[in-house]
Amino acid sequence: MAMNDNGWRGGKRDNNDGPPDLDEIFRSLNQKLSRLLGGRGGQGGGSPDGGRALFKGGASLLALILGGVWLASGFYVVDAREVGVVLRMGSFNRVSDSGLQWHAPYPFEKVEIVTLTEVRSVEVGYRGNAKNRIPEESLMLTEDQNIIDVQLSVQYDVKDPKAFLFNNATGDRDAKDIVKQATETAIREVVGRNKVDFVLNEGRAQVASETAALIQQTLDRYNLGVRVSKVNINDVQPPEQVLAAFDDAVKASQDREKLRNEGQAYANDVIPKASGLASRLMEEAEGYKQRVVSNAEGDAARFKQVLAEYSKAPGVMRERLYQDMMQQILSNSSKVLVDQKSGSNLLYLPLDKLIQQTHPQQAGAAPQAGAPAANLPPPPTTEPASSAPAGANRSSSRDVVRSREFEER
């Protein structure tokens, strides 16, 4: 194709057929900008000075717009659960609170948003669920040289955003790698200080609390700005190879505890009864002691009183004591009074009365008499010694006379 056909005429492009010239484009743009600024745009081509002025005015406006956009890029919003860490030329400058904030635009300042209330978690010994075990993390040695499988998870949050951003040397922004390593170190130390029975049975809560404290100490030593909120011991069991043997040992331990509880229950039932019986016997003995001592003291006091009266009138007191003693003795014994003056040769003994006094259970039995009651003489009367005549029964009551003679001596 010839050059003239493409719009070139004498080394110049034809304006009617080809694209517009660059000067024309800038000139038209300056005219539009000048109209917006209140100036009067020329019709068609203007002078070169006027075109330069229009170009400078449009460039200033464009620079002003771009500057406004650049300054507006420094505005940012911080949520109530977050804080903003402002970095100036890559170094820490300040911490901004929640709300609409502003910082110097890039590249002078930038802001890092850190969520404080977000609870992050790290799993040790498993991933996802208990079936996905990781033996190199979960197997550990106890104090008594036993191997157990421990699975746990750690929950933590951010307490110092500056330390969390600047002291976290790993590529993980949540610091999970450091927390995981600190957790493995802490749980192995705590398990290594305790026996296998304690870790498997009653010591889970204590192991979790000690592990959380040890993890927090390690993270504070690194100044990571992380706070451990909770350590969950998800599963603790022996390795699968010895699980059956451990189950038998646990069953035996449970049986031992059951028998111990039964023995303790029996002891709790027997010991209080024995203690109560011993206390009752002690109280009865103490009461008997007090009664005997009181009776002895009373007898002694009564004897002293009688002694004082006896010293005043010995004869009267001796006669009274003798009568009281004889009344006490004769009232508890059977007595037969025989009248020798009547001259009766037949002596009738009241066997029924004697038997009744000797054996009270045979009180209703009738005596076997050989003669009828009507043909027998009347039985002698039985009276206490105090009611008998003074001269009666002297010959038959020899013991009484002898006792009285002994008293008179």
Image (tube, rainbow, N blue to C red):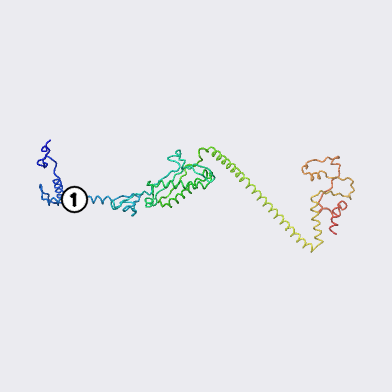
Q: Mark 1 falls on what kind of element?
A: helix
In the rendered image, the quadrant that contains the N terminus is top left
Could you say which is closer to the camera, residue 39 or residue 143? 143
Furthest toward the bottom, the residue is 312
Is residue 58 toward the left or the right of residue 340 in the image? left
Is residue 183 toward the left or the right of residue 256 in the image? left
In the rendered image, the quadrant that contains the C terminus is bottom right
Q: Position of residue 246 (x, y in %)?
A: 54, 39
Q: Position of residue 26 (x, y in %)?
A: 15, 47
Q: Position of residue 408 (x, y in %)?
A: 85, 59
Is residue 304 toward the left or the right of residue 241 in the image? right
Q: Residue at x 18, y 50 (%)?
A: 59
What is the tally of numbered marks visible in this picture? 1
Furthest toward the top, the residue is 1
Could you say which is closer to the camera, residue 61 or residue 302? 61
Which residue in the structure is indicated by mark 1?
59
Q: Residue at x 50, y 39 (%)?
A: 239
Q: Position of residue 171 (x, y in %)?
A: 37, 46
Could you say which is closer to the camera, residue 369 or residue 320? 320
Could you say which is closer to the camera, residue 56 or residue 79? 56
Quick one: label 1, few (<14), some, or many (20+) residues within 10 Å?
Answer: some
Q: Residue at x 51, y 37 (%)?
A: 241
